[in-house]
Each structure stands twice: as structure tokens, then as C-alpha cells.
Image: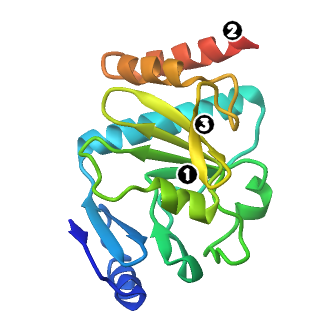
Amino acid sequence: MLLQNVSWETYERLLSESVNNCGKRFIYDSGELEIMVVYVGHENANRTLASMVEVTAEESGQDFARAGSTTFKREDLAKGFEPDSCYYFRDAARIRDKREFDMAVDPPPELVIEVDITRSSLNRFPIFAGIGVAEVWRYDGKTVRFHRLDGSGYRLIETSVALPPLTAAQATIFLEQSRTETVPAWLRSVRAWIREQK
């Protein structure tokens, strides 16, 4: 559902009233508010991509901190979003014990995962760019694409900057394989591929 002319105060009120109501995402950009309900097809892809992040980081010896679908918002920019999943790498130690984020002082997530199978009405890239998200992995139901912040917008990249050697093409292959393989077999194949790239 996309609502127009929504005040920041209304957005904040909806967030506070939905704290214990899982399964909804609120995305806000300059008076436009999108409310999405998450379903299993969406979550399967999200969790699979998140597993790829974590296995790749582990195999690469890279520390990370999970921030899940935390609400990130900046009133001064009139922007707010709740990602499907997100991660910190350089700032992992600084973020790990955080209970709340203040985007006026805390860094934005370094990697955001967006699963957009149902075609979102609100373009999230300007929101991510405004808040300063460095990398976005987006899955449209068919293909995984990696995007890197470049100035005030994003450009497509083939290899993740946050998690080399993972490529968008290989992430798409892994996502397809996850539909037919058992989880242990799938995890072994992801690990094996990463080790072969070293």
C-alpha cells in the first residue's frame, strides 16, 4: 500500500505502534509511505541471500555484524526504511552491541539486501543513497543484481565490493540451487565455490 502526503509524525507513530507486529515493512520518502506485508516467498529469498553473505564473510575471514530489518531513519532528510536484511563490515565492532541506532551519529549499513518480487511502488534507491548505504543486493524474483553507491546514485557492479569474490551472477545461481538442494548440501556448495576462488 502506497500512501501520499504522510507527515513525519504519522510515520513515527505508525512505527511505534507496529514495534511488536512482525511481518510489515515501512518505507518513507518525503511524504510518501509504503507499507508492505512480508510473505514466505519473499523471506526464503531474503534468508538465502543473507546466508550467502554470512558464509562468504566467514570463509573470507571478514568480521560482520547483522542489523536485520532494523528501522533506519533521518528526519532531516525525510527518509526512512526497513531493509529485508543488512550488514556492517568495517563498522562491525562498533555496531555489534547497539540496541538503537541514531542515524545522525551512527554509520549507515554497508550492505542492504532487498527482495522485490511483488514490484515495490516506491523507488528505494534514492532513500538508500540519501542515508548513505554503500552497496545494495536486489533480487527481483529472477536475477540478483549488485549495486554500488556512486555519488548520489547507484551503478550496477558484477563483483561485490563488500564481499569479494561473490558475483551477482553466482549469487543468482546459488539462489536457484537453494530451491532444489537440501540446506546442508547447498551450504557445502557455497563454501566450496568461495574456497575455489581464493
Circle 3: element type: helix
For marks 3 and 2, the one nearer the N-term is 3
Counting from the top left corner in percent of width and height, residue 169 is at: 50, 19
Label 1, on which residue?
86
Query: Gap in Å between the C-alphas at discs 1 and 3?
Result: 11 Å
Q: Which residue lies furthest to the bottom in this view?
A: 9
Q: Residue furthest top?
A: 196
Circle 1: element type: strand
Label 2, on which residue?
196
Q: Nearer the viewer, residue 97 or 107?
A: 107
Position of the N terminus, as image quadrant, is bottom left
Q: Which residue is drawn at 64% across and 59% down?
A: 132
Q: In this view, does 28 lie above or below 6?
A: above
Give the amino acid at mark 1.
Cys
Label 3, on which residue?
54
Numbered badge on residue 126: none
Give the amino acid at mark 3.
Glu
Counting from the top left corner in percent of width and height, residue 100 is at: 61, 75
Query: Gap in Å between the C-alphas at discs 1 and 2?
Result: 26 Å
Report the number of numbered marks: 3
Circle 2: element type: helix
Q: Which residue is drawn at 33% across and 82% down?
A: 14
Q: Residue at x 39, y 55 (%)?
A: 123
